[in-house]
Amino acid sequence: MRRTLAVLALALAAVASGCGGSVGVGGTGSYSYAPIEGFGSIYVGGIEYDDSQAAVFDEDGAAIARDSLRLGMVVEVEGGDIGGSEAAPTAQALRIRTSTELVGLASAVNAAAGTLRVFDQTVRVDAYTLFDAGLPEGLASVAEGAALEVFGSYDVASTSFLATRIAPRAGTLAEYRVRGPVQDLDAAARRFRIGAARFSYEGAQPLLAEGAWLRVRADTVPSAGRWMLRDAGAGMRPPQALARVRLRGPITRYASDVDFDLNGQRVDARGAAFDGHPGDLALGKAVEVDGVANNGVIVATRVRLDDHGGAQGSITLQGTIGALDRVAKTFVLRGSTVAYGAGGVQFEGGSEADLANGRAVTVKAASHGHDTLLTARRITFN
C-alpha cells in the first residue's frame, strides 16, 4: 500500500557517487518509517524486510508480539544493509517500533463524508484507509465515544489527519495522544495547540517550541477547555548522518521550492533536480524526495510530485494458501481473505487451477478499506 506517508533511510556502506559529487563514508544499515505495505517478510516503504529475528516494540518501547503487526500500521524499522535490487530492495530487520498519530475517543462520525474526530482532531479516511477486523463495516462500525488508535499522517494545510489504519483500543484510555506541530505557543501562559487540540502545561518542557514536531500525551479530562500535558517527546527521530534517504509525504512547512519540511523533517533542495514545474509545490502537497541526511537535514538530490500511488496491486502478501473456496473464489493468506474472482487477475508460474491449500504464493492485492478483505491483482506461484 503505497501512501503519501513514508520515510526511508538507506545507510551507505562505502563512498557514494553519481549525485553531483562524492557523498562520503556512512555507517551500514537501513532505516524506514512508513505504513506496513505487506507481509511474508514485512514490507515497509518499498523495502522487503526479513523480520524473523526482529525485536518488535510499541511506541513506548514495550515489547510486543511480531504477529500483532497489521497492514497500514505506521512503523519505524531499523535494519541491516540493503541488498536485492533497485526495484526490489531487501534487508534484515533488527528492530521494529509502531507509531500512532492519535489515541482518543471518537466523535462526530460521518461515514458518508468519510470523517470523524479523535482527540479534537478531524480524521479523514479514503479508499485506501484500512480498518481493523473489529470494525467490519469500516467507518460505519465506529460508535460515538469508541476508543481508537489512528495511524497515518498530519496535513498542515487542512489541519486534519489522513488515516492509513484505524483500530479500536481495548479498555479505558488512561491518556490521549497526538503527534504534530506545536502552534500558538505562549510560554508565559503555558499554552499551545497541536491541530485543534489546545493544551496547558506545568514545569519545564524543553522540547516545546513553535513549529516543533512533537508526540504528546495528555490527561483525558480537560480543564477550562484545555488538555493538561503529561509529557512531550520528539515526533520523529531524524535519519542517521551520511545516509541515503528517500522521503514520501505531505509538505508540513513550506518556505520555498528549495526549503520545506516533510512530516516535520527539514529538506534542503537547493541542489536538487525537480521533476515538475514552478508552483507545483505548496503546503500539504505530497512529494517524494531522494537525498542524503546531514546534521538532521535532508539534502535533496531529486524532488518529484507524489502521484499518491494507491492501493491497486501494491499490497504484498507471501505465504501458503489456506481455506481455499473455489465457489466464492477466495482463500486466506497471512490472516487476510484474498478474492481472486475479479477479471484481470494475472497468474505467474501457474494458473487458477493450480491454487491449492498449502501452496506457497506471492500475491499483489488491492484493499477494500479493510485489512481482512483484499482483491488479488497478481498471483505468483513460488
Image (tube, rainbow, N blue to C red):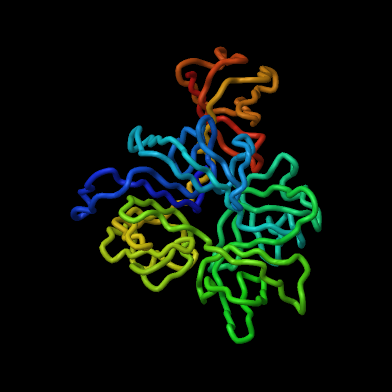
Most foreground residue, 331 or 199: 199
Residue 158: x and y, percent? 57, 67
Which residue is drawn at the image coordinates 75% and 42% (left, top)? 134
**x then y, percent, for residue 64:** 63, 41
Q: Quadrant of residue 70?
A: top right
Residue sitting at the far left: 21
- Residue sitting at x 65%, y 22%: 329
Q: Position of residue 109 (x, y in %)?
A: 75, 58
| Residue 379 relative to residue 89: left or right | right
| Towards the viewer: 194 or 171 | 171
Question: Is 197 or 374 nearer to us in this picture?
Answer: 197
Q: Is residue 324 left or right of residue 320?
A: right
Residue lying furthest front in this view? 203
The residue furthest bottom is 188
Query: On the rendered structure, is 226 left or right of 350?
Result: right
Q: Horizontal and vertical percent for residue 24?
A: 23, 52
Residue 192 in which image quadrant? bottom right
